[in-house]
Amino acid sequence: MNRLVGRVHAPGPSGLIAACLAAIAIVHAAEGDSMNQLAERYVKLVLAMGQHDADYVDAYYGPPEWRKESEAGKRPLDQIDKEAAALQQSLGAAAPASAAEEMLRLRHTYLTKQVSALRARIAMLSGRTLTFDEESRALYDAVAPTNDPVTFERTVEELGKRLPGSGSVLERYDAFRNRFVIPRERLDATFKAAIDGCRSRTLQHVTLPPGESFTVEYVTNKSWSGYNWYQGQYKSLIQVNTDLPIYVDRAIDLACHEGYPGHHVYNVLLEKNLVRDRGWVEFSVYPLFSPQSLIAEGTANFGIDVAFPSQERLAFERSTIFPAAGLDPARAAEYYEVLALVDRLSYAGNEAARRYINGQLDAKGAASWLERYALYTPPRAAQRVRFMDQYRSYVINYNLGKDMVKRYVESKGGTASNATKRWDVFEQLISSPRLPSGLR
């Protein structure tokens, strides 16, 4: 999607993980048995929903018999909703005291929000119509700001003055950016160089369990640009879509977002700290259409800046990425100056999705909006509309999620001038069950 979506079935846990969960469940039985039971009910409901919604279960590595149980029979949506409503009541009765450990309170809030989002998704699949903002609030616990098109027009005009040549601003931007495409034959080497850089920087600040790793595959015919499929046991499969040209900036963006310190690290730390160490089985399943996604996408996008502050990134691009791609390092600064302006158009994509989902634009109109205000080429605009068809208000999780995470980390002292603190707060965030409403 940056982390956008595809679909694979992750394997169940090894005997080691299952044994760890069983042992930890015994250790924590006295203090948390009721919450563990509620968590099990939640996981089984998510798996049951996955039988109705092919995109819903993004990852699962919990007890394999629970998956088999969900696949044995497709339970009706109204039955799943009835059980989810009962789970909500049970969670209300199990609220921890205000003096309880923060992690226990966060766990309870997490489960409560996730179940609420589950019921909202059931309602949508049952025919309930929600506006873009109603949907994002119900599923992701957040609403993106509304922006006047005039704001985007001003940035487009500014870009027009910056870009050489003739033709529309979009045509000139496309011509400019096409000089920075990674050649197909250099794609794998360039990504490997980016991954090495992202990983080495992450490991200077974050301790990861032995054996963590991921593999990279290059795929086609997707509505997204890249995706991390977490497999459990500290392993990920990262897929990169090669349908459209891949520009040089995407090397670090995807390596950080999908890998280090993004989705791969996020999922590894949740598995290590919450599933294995605490026995919180609810984190062995990831429902895509839930508040967890805003944290996942927001931290993955902000993680790019954490790993590579602007000037350090520029230096790495010049020394490593541009040479690996066979591009002129002397043009790196010019390229990133233009991208900084284009980044100000990020929320134009949200506006296109809002109008499209609310019925104010049809597919052609949404694509035209993206071309005009976000400077998407027609093929990219068409791909993005396909993404909107599949994932709807999910689009807010990238830019709004990043902004919310950035504000949260900086409010805790993790500013750009204090890199060590920034990494510390960032790691704490991706190791805990904090959700969007907890970032405010």
Image: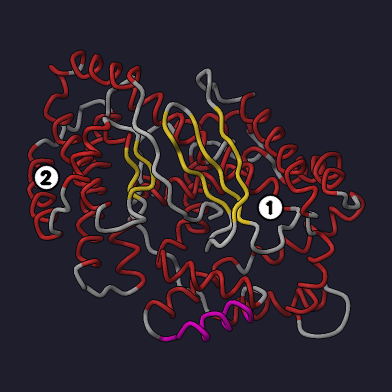
Seen at 30% across and 29% down, the residue is 103
Write down the residue under mark 2: 87
Q: Residues under labels 2 and 1: Cα distance?
A: 42 Å
Q: Is residue 397 left or right of residue 274?
A: right
Which portion, as a residue range, is magenta?
360-372
Seen at 77% across and 44% down, the residue is 311
Seen at 28% across and 61% down, the residue is 138
Q: Is residue 69 left or right of residue 354?
A: left
Task: Kindly tell me whether residue 255 is visible in this rendering.
Answer: yes
- Is residue 434 covered in magenta? no
Using the image, tell me which numbered label, if any, was put on residue 250. Answer: 1
Q: Relative to 43, is 100 above or below?
A: above
Q: Residues within 10 Å of mark 1 (few under 14, many from 20)?
A: some
**SS state under label 2:** helix
Q: Amino acid at mark 2?
A: Leu
Horizontal and vertical percent position of residue 35: 16, 31
Horizontal and vertical percent position of residue 161: 82, 77
Horizontal and vertical percent position of residue 260: 59, 36
Q: Is residue 332 left or right of residue 99?
A: right
Seen at 54% across and 59% down, the residue is 224
- Is residue 366 covered in magenta? yes
